[in-house]
Amino acid sequence: MSVYPVIFDPIYKPRIWGGHRIFAHFGRAQTTGEPVGESWELVDLEDDQSRAIDGAARGRTLAELVAAWGPKLLGHAGLIEGRFPLLIKFLDAAGPLSVQVHPTEAVARRLGGAVRVKHEAWYILAADAGSFIYHGLQPGVDADAFRRGMLGGQIEGILRRVPVRPGDCFYLPSGTAHTLGPGVLVAEVQTPSDITYRAYDWGRIDPATAAPRALHLDQAIECIDFDLPAPPPMQERQHVATISTTVTRLVACPSFIIERVRMSEGTCRDIPYAEPVVWIVLEGGGHVSWQGGGRLPFGKGNVVLLPAGLSQGTVSIAEPTQWLEVTVPVPSDLAGYEHPPRETPAPSGDRPVVQIGLARANR
């Protein structure tokens, strides 16, 4: 089976804090009357597997495609404990999420099993007026102050409140205390982990159990480094533009890179990647074609996985379109080589001698 671009069937997750905005925002048919908090668009976990919706791979799971396609899917990107290295979701916070922390590398190593490090980023798709998130600790908050705040429901003064608007993008490395406030719809990019330690849950009662949801305050505190300042909510943006295309880098970390791509109507471009790429389509649409006559239409709300070995891929844009382009950093073939001095002193009266060497870099 030759590789080709794949769209997967969403997995909808009812949540106590969820709503119905995912369906309305993307024009999807409502599949359940329950409030849906999460739509898992691309996942390879023990208990959740995305399944392809079209083409020769229809019905196959992402894990099966990883096994069948191997380097033709992954290129030089590595798996994370045998899992595809990205997990993509949409989140609808009709109510606030719990205050939560995700496992760090040290905690994941100590506990093992399905406990894996969880780095993530939120791209704000829609937000009510006055919407916010909490991102990291206020300066000077230590473990005792954090524990007292969570036990007493005192969030202000403990967590940093950040106003949000559509188009904002926030990086949440593991160990960062955080939560989404109400009225916010986001696209979430993360590493393949489903472990969350709740520190506070707003006193909610789970209707399924008639009891409060479990908290994991000790585990959350273990994951926070109280000696480090909270990371900045947003990274500095970088822009590259041509007549028909604009690319804005939103997040770059060792686990993933997120760029927002805008293309004008009528644009046709080769797909130049040699590594797997995920497109989260925000607006507009078009189609991808590839060698052999394959053609995949895409539009708002689609999450498209482009394999590393896609042959002669081309994207054609039917209307003004933008998407989030998610890639996994891979080691450079030049890794390990240090960059030598650019110039060496030259004899008096002579021109400098320029030295060209190999640099340590990531593609």
Image (tube, rainbow, N blue to C red):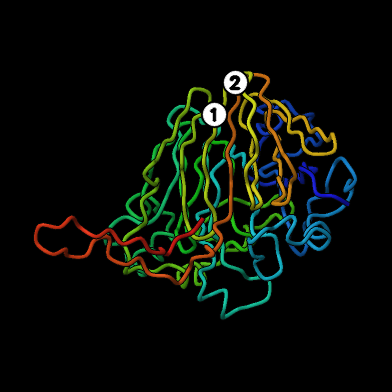
Going by the numbered disc 2, the residue's amino acid type is: Pro
Q: Position of residue 87 (x, y in %)?
A: 65, 53
Q: Check contact, mark 2 vs mark 1: CB within 8 A.
A: yes
Asked where in the image residue 227 lies, by quadrant, the reply is: bottom left
Q: Which residue is mark 1?
A: 262
**Residue under the point 58% across and 50% down:** 327
**Residue under the point 50% across and 76% down:** 106
Going by the numbered disc 1, the residue's amino acid type is: Arg
Q: Is residue 28 above or below residue 279?
A: above
Dot 2: element: strand
Query: In 3D space, how far apart are the residues under numbered discs 2 and 1 (Cα atoms)?
Result: 8 Å
> Which residue reaches farthest bottom?
110
Q: Which residue is mark 2?
A: 320
Q: Position of residue 165 (x, y in %)?
A: 45, 32
**Residue under the point 63% across and 47% down:** 273
Q: Nearer the viewer, residue 90 or 330?
A: 330
Q: Is residue 334 above or below residue 73?
A: below
Q: Position of residue 305 (x, y in %)?
A: 71, 45
Q: Earlier in the sequence, mark 2 or mark 1?
A: 1
Relative to 129, is 2 on the left or the right? Answer: right
Q: Nearer the viewer, residue 294 or 277?
A: 294
Q: Is residue 320 above or below residue 41?
A: above
Asked where in the image residue 313 lies, by quadrant, the reply is: top right
Q: Position of residue 28 (x, y in %)?
A: 75, 29
Neighbor class of circle 1 (other Cα within 10 Å; few <14, some 14-19, many 20+) is: many
